Amino acid sequence: MIGLEQVYWLAGAMFAAIAVRSFGDRANRKRYGNAAFWGLLAVSFLFGSELGDVANGVLVLALTGLGATAMGLGSPKSTSAEERETSARTEGNAVFTPALVIPVIAIAGTLTLGRLEIGGAPLADPKQVTLIALALGIIIALVVALLRFRPPALAPVEEGRRLCDAIGWAIILPQLLASLGAVFAISGVGAAVGRIATTWLPLGHPFAAVAAYCIGMALFTMVMGNAFAAFPVMTAAIGLPLIVHRFGGDPAIMGAVGMLAGYCGTLATPMAANYNIVPAALLELPDRNGVIRVQIPTAIPLLVCNIVLMYVLVFRF
Amino acid sequence: MQRLVRITPALYRAPMSLWPLLGIAVLVIGFAAGINPLIAIVAAGLTTGVAAGLSPLHIVAALGKAYNDSRYVSIVWLILPVIGLLERAGLQERARMLIVRVRAATVGRILIAYLALRQITVALGLTTLCGQAQTVRPLIAPMAEAAADVRFGPLSARTRYLIRAYAASADNVGAFFGEDIFIAVSSILLVKGFLQQSGFDIAPLRLSLWAIPTALTAFAIHGFRLWRLDARIKRLAAENPP
């Protein structure tokens, strides 16, 4: 059965190839750092399931140290601006084809992969079909691109390395934040935040309770980087006891709007790295908070609107 | 600190300390001081863990386990070699050529259209159709930059970065405030699951329905800001030529 593990092998192979090419890149003064970072990332994907928690923890510390201090920008061979301009004219809209193959296969695969069986056993892990289908779409798109453009054999690795180096250490940020979330959870941070919210705030009026719940969702989401972590804490601390039980609000409206109030926080925090920091790296912005800066003026009025919406709707339906 | 402990009976019984919150302080200070975020995050984890009385080995193991368990977040990077190959074949240039032909195209209009597309497709459950790596970097950001180039001539670096940041924001706002309209999304299931544990059995469809007012508001607010972006770019182009 194909599961996430097989997709991880693929990622491991990709990062291993990038590590090898980084190692031989004499134009990069920090080539050993890059090679070690991408190499350890490959180890994580290839052997992470066998390593054990402490070894994985040491690996995380090593990746952190390397990522923060030892990485430079490689100089993989790519095409020049003029070559790209020419290719864009001759290839025409065919350059878009592989990019469109990915979502088509990803969606078709999500709908069908879970049902395919070989000898009575499912072909793909039914719980992971979305990610497996995405990986499948990427493989097929890669083959289509290679057949269509006939680049040099090493081009996929070199182009992958070009983009990976551009993202740099930020590539592990989402996973590292998940680790921090786990340590916060076992250390009781959520409960402590919930207690502060309930003890310091005057919540005698329905509007105050709604406002505290929504703002609490947004702030706690900013701290944790994830509205999912905030929802159980804030709902247990303010949502259910006050909005629903004391003031008679509707739990469905509270839950739906409350979660979206949390998303306003997601727009405004570097902790939500895969949405805010990684795109800044991906788009090669010099200011890593550049995306957050343009999102905050949307997040604040939207949070206010959520408070008003919840107050108007939750006690009425 | 003492005053906090006595408020609710349930909390009073729980042996709970506020010291683990020190990690949050470390994180905020680290981010504000411009320390590499990886270092700030690990330092915050160690601080919180130690403050909660965990042994260093226990903390390292917890970091390692969660890191390993969340490898699925990074699967999206498999796309980088494909995007790189397409860029080498002129993907961004082609996207620019297409936009230059569309006379009505402005940065604001392109990003509003993308915001709507993202929100609608995500609401239908097609989350992987677009994304920062799949569409924003190779297509949307170059298209938006090209539209501004056509109107105002070559842009300053600052304006270029601003347009890219707004392109990323359109993707985020569209994805966040579209996804809860789709009933099978994990956040809806989380809300349903949590409320169920608390004794409220709620149909996912009802949760989806009540996500719609916020979705429309989000489109209105961010759409309005994207619409005004055109005037801002015009001003920037007049003030600082490249």
Image (tube, rainbow, N blue to C red):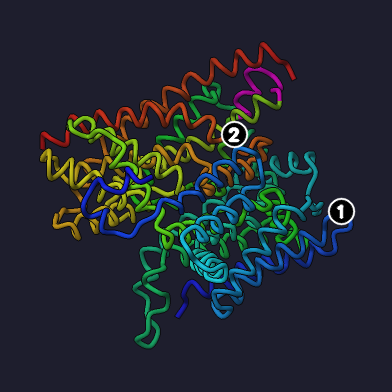
In front: A100, or A131? A131
Looking at the rendered structure, the secondary structure element under dot 2 is helix
Would you identify the image quadrant in which residue B159 lies?
A: top right
Residue B70 appears in view: yes
Would you identify the image quadrant in which residue B154 lies?
A: top right
Q: What is the three-letter code of the residue carrying label 2?
A: Gly
Q: Is residue B151 magenta?
A: yes
What residue is shown with label 1? A29
In front: B100, or B133? B133
What residue is shown with label 2? A290
Which range is magenta?
B145-156
Single out the residue that lies furthest toward the front.
B2
Residue A130, x across and y down, in percent: 42, 63
- Residues at badges 1 and 2 in contact (C-beta under 8 Å)? no
The chain letter for the residue carrying disc 1 is A
> Relative to B53, is B227 above or below?
above
